[in-house]
Image (cartoon, rainbow, N blue to C red):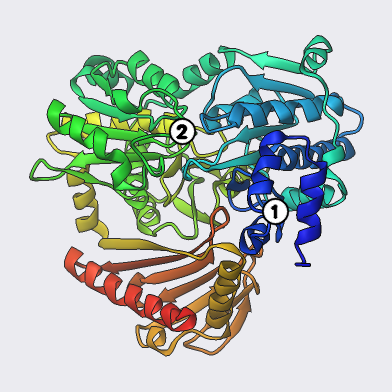
Amino acid sequence: MHEFEPVYQKWLERSTSREINDELSTIAGNIPEIQDRFYRNLEFGTGGIRGLIGAGPNRINTYTIRKTTLGLAQLILKLYPRQENKVIIAYDSRHKSREFALETALVLAKNKIQALVFQEIAPTPLLSFGVRELQATAGVVITASHNPKEYNGYKVYAGHGGQITDNLAQAVTQEIYRIADEFAIETMEQKEAEAQGLLIWLQDEILEKYLTLTENLLLNKRLVQECASELNIVYTPLYGTGLKPVRRILQDTGFTNLHIVKEQAEADPDFPSLVCPNPEDPAACSLALREGILLGADLILATDLDADRVGILVRNQQGHFVSLSGNQTGALLIDYILHMRKQQGTLPPNGVIVKTIVTSGLGAAVAQKSGIGCVDVLTGFKYIGEKISEFDQNKLHTFLFGYEESFGYLIGEHVRDKDGIQTCLCIAEMALYYKKRGITLYERLNQIYNEIGHYAEDLVNLEFSGLKGQLQIKRITDSFRAGPPEKLKNLGLISCKDYLESAVYDYRTGQTSRLDFPRANILYYSLAKGAWSCIRPSGTEPKLKVYVGAVEKTREEALRSLSILKQTLLGFIHTLVS
């Protein structure tokens, strides 16, 4: 008998779901498939728990949702035993999202924790806002963000409105481990939960309050009031949750020359024209691009399924649309926000921006020109939300802007996670501002490069599926951890930050110092002239992520240096897995 067979048999015998039982029956005798579904339990990564929808503990299904929720409920009751606890729940347009949201609510209700569930699909930033607005103990959003349609996920938010970070995630995980039998978890009947006030359905009141606060983020209200309709915008929600709030916030502030991509407007869990609803992927914006060209648009906006990420396309000097990277969009927003606040005299002396360590130094360099500092955090927007809460408590800094290279941005801290809705508004204002000055966002970006140097970045996602893939990823990271490849040293290697070992290795002096950061399986290399590279396993997908960046005086030199660095790293990785 194979080692995973007993767990498989347990699921086959104990599950009361016909769908799950039928699925398990179809894989009988298929050892690789059984192994993939049963070799591990889904765990919290950089963006909560995320996995394929299906049967088994390494899949998202009714039983893994119940088990995760019971673990969360038990931790809440341990931490806050004497208060009336409530958890807000949102869900996106994916397959089974509403069903999983209701399962979450009914497990909480059974444990006497009130569940407040959005009546309709709702974007992740609205959940983050709602947690603080309603003074909830925690929040849950059922989403797999930009993953393919076969996926779903479960993100947990703390009372401060940001995603739970390592300590709380580990505490929830420990509670989950204590649950011996996922098939014995009890839920309350929906009608009983509603009758007892343990299941409340949220209407639009939260959205209205959120939109009001988001409108206040406008930095040049007079310009927007007088000229917003002059900006021609094409927007696609990519079949997700962004349609209602993005259309409202843009039209309510005067951006009425707004065109929605009809084919991708309505929520659809199959997102038929896409492989992934990911605005980072240029292919996801192909319909919006077609419409933008036909309509002579100035700006194209795209949000992912849960509307926390934004991709943009702008016109270059030749009038053709080009996609901007997350690093570029973030730098433009920093440049604009700091410029406007300095002009208005509202730039605080202790202001800072916050970015993840894999985000380019371009934005930090822009901020430095205005005398504003930059705080680096681990990958995952949850660490940015955590920093904002720290600043609230210690008053050492004033938060001005937070972002990550993967198209996540935050301007207004009434939300404590990346927010595609408020970002759409701020990008529209910024594009309008420069249009009235006769230039595009792309041209302003080139002005920034000419002022501070040309930055080039790239990200390579290497996919390694299943148990074999996990072992390959470990082999690669272990090999890098044992020592950098010689060819990397030849490119002017200065230091390596090993976040797992909490150590900084200085290759110029041979000295080792302590890295005061949370532990994570990340290796970050600093090279001459501002070049850098970072290697880390993805926290949400079976991938190894390889980041590279270079800084040079010209764009051509930056791209050349970037290419050499990328090929050096990928060549070494290839020797490890070939």
- Which residue is painted at 78% across and 42% down in the image? 67
Earlier residue among tags 2 and 1 = 1
Check disc 1 and report the residue beneath it: 166
- Which residue is painted at 68% across and 54% down in the image? 28
* Front residue (pair 503, 51): 51
Q: Are marks 2 and 1 in contact (CB under 8 Å)?
A: no
Residue 134 on image: x %, y %: 68, 21
Indicate the amino acid at tag 1: Asp
Q: Residue furthest right?
A: 82
Q: Secondary structure at mark 2?
A: loop
Mark linked to residue 307: 2
Given this view, does label 2 or label 1 mark the residue nearer the observer?
2
Q: Can residue 122 be seen at all in this image of the molecule?
A: yes
Residue 531 on image: x %, y %: 36, 71
Indicate the amino acid at tag 2: Ala
Number of marks drawn: 2
Q: Residues within 10 Å of mark 1 (few under 14, many from 20)?
A: some
Residue 160 on image: x %, y %: 67, 35
- Which residue is painted at 87% across and 38% down in the image? 184
Q: Secondary structure at mark 1?
A: helix
* Front residue (pair 105, 357): 105
Q: Is residue 193 above or below residue 536?
A: above
Q: Can residue 159 be seen at all in this image of the molecule?
A: no
Mark linked to residue 522: none
Residue 443 horizontal side relative to residue 167, left or right = left
Q: CA distance from mark 2 to mark 1?
A: 24 Å
Q: Is residue 349 above or below residue 479?
A: above
* Front residue (pair 560, 271): 271
* Front residue (pair 327, 573): 573
Locate residue 159: give its quadrant.
top right
Locate residue 100: give its quadrant.
top right
Q: Residues within 10 Å of mark 2 (few under 14, many from 20)?
A: many
